[in-house]
Amino acid sequence: MPLWLDKEHSGKVIHDMRSPFNGLMGLTECMVMMVKDAKKKEQLAWINKCSRRYLNWIDAVTNIEDMAAGIAPWKKEDVALGYVVQEACALLGMSKTQYNEFLLKDGVTLNDQSGWTETPMVKGYESGISRIIYNVIQNAIQYTEKGSVTVTGEDLPDRAVIHVEDTGIGMPQEDLQRIFEPFVVLEPRRLPGRFGLGLSVARECSEFMGGKIDVTSELGKGTKFSITFFKDPPNAVTDAVNKGPEGFGHYVNNAPLLDANRNQQRFLGVIAHGLIPAMMGCIGMSDLLLNNEPKKPSKKQLAMVYRSGCRIVEVMNLITRCTLIVEPVPLAPSEFQLKDVLEWIKKELDVAVDKRGNAYKKKGMEL
């Protein structure tokens, strides 16, 4: 199959990745300095720190020649694990989809009971640690229809352990390891936008930094993930390696690298895929701030923050779909509800815009 993503296209995609982040960071940094309310300042700081971390990750990873050769940069740095957990719970608790729907279902709560603020400190790659935490918590939210998702922590002498426990649908014992394989989605239907990469990325990031992820589950009762980060991991990789992007089995299963174009596509796909959970949280948090802001100048700035977040999610969804569309997604014949597919199509058409940003659906039109 001919692939569209040559070096020129890759450069354009990388530019489109970076651009909205600069606006998001600049606006929130300015507002953090101006706002006096401590709670608002904290919420804006979460958005700012989150967007800065991921822009730094984009800058570190998106060297076109390195991507083509399958080279991924890794480094060992001090990471305030407590802050990342606090930020992830705060943003994912307010997370909104591109359809302006909350990720948390009605009646479901996300509880941060770790008691952590900054500490514990661990050694690892901050962007990798944050993606592990965001992906695991988001996965728990997506499969919990009622009850709660609870995050707790253990600060031990040589390690820190994060437990993410939900009251969701659970899974049979034979599937506990399959969920960490690339492109595996354990549900009777696969709607567009679900690639089954979140947990495989989390597992490979964890093992590459010398940590691990354990899971226990009971069908119909819920699932518990335990993520272990060592404070000074002896087996962590601390330099660039030519194993390709994480999440595709290159680290855990020693899957061979592909050709240069496919390596580039996979890198861009996994980057875009990894940015979406956090940015959905930024959308929800900025929407909350916008709706509670009485001052017009601040309201205008928050509206720009909100639109920047929406733009990032829109671009990242597009990049994810375009780059991963050629992947060999394992699909088994199964029954599915046609109404679910039709509902997804309706949602897509409700928010669809042309190249100038104008809505396809005319004002007053109902689908």
Image (cartoon, grey):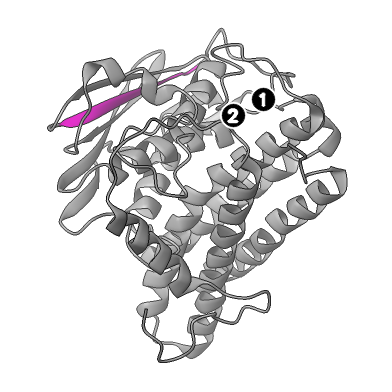
Q: Is residue 363 above or below residue 29?
A: below
Taking the spot 61% from the left edge, 69% from the top edge, the residue there is: 27
Residue 354 rendering spot, x and y as whole percentages: 63, 76
Q: In this view, does 325 lie above or below 338?
A: above
Mark 1 neighbour class, 10 Å CA radius: few under 14, some 14 to 19, many 20 or more = some
Label 1 sits on residue: 75
Residue 110 visible in the displayed image = yes
Mark 2 neighbour class, 10 Å CA radius: few under 14, some 14 to 19, many 20 or more = many
Does residue 194 belong to the magenta stretch? no
Quadrant assignment for the N terminus: top right
Residue 41 visible in the displayed image = no
Q: Earlier in the sequence, mark 1 or mark 2?
A: 1
Across the whole image, how many numbered discs are drawn on residues? Answer: 2
Residue 231 rendering spot, x and y as whole percentages: 48, 18
User: How much space separates mark 1 and mark 2, taking CA atoms?
Assistant: 6 Å
Q: Which residues, given as a range, are shown in magenta? A: 222-231
Does residue 227 belong to the magenta stretch? yes
Residue 244 rendering spot, x and y as whole percentages: 69, 24
Is 238 placed left or right of 347 in the picture?
A: right
Q: Mostly what secondary structure, the magenta segment?
A: strand
Label 2 sits on residue: 125
Taking the spot 42% from the left edge, 23% from the top edge, the residue there is: 180
Determine the image quadrant of residue 135. top left
Q: What residue type is labelled 2?
A: Tyr
Q: Which secondary structure lies at badge 1?
A: loop
Query: Could you say which disc has been placed on residue 121 in the image?
Result: none
Q: Which secondary structure lies at badge 2?
A: loop
2 vs 128, nearest the viewer: 2
Contact, CB < 8 Å: mark 1 with mark 2? yes
Is 111 placed left or right of 136 in the picture?
A: left
Taking the spot 29% from the left edge, 45% from the top edge, the residue there is: 336
Taking the spot 19% from the left edge, 39% from the top edge, the residue there is: 168
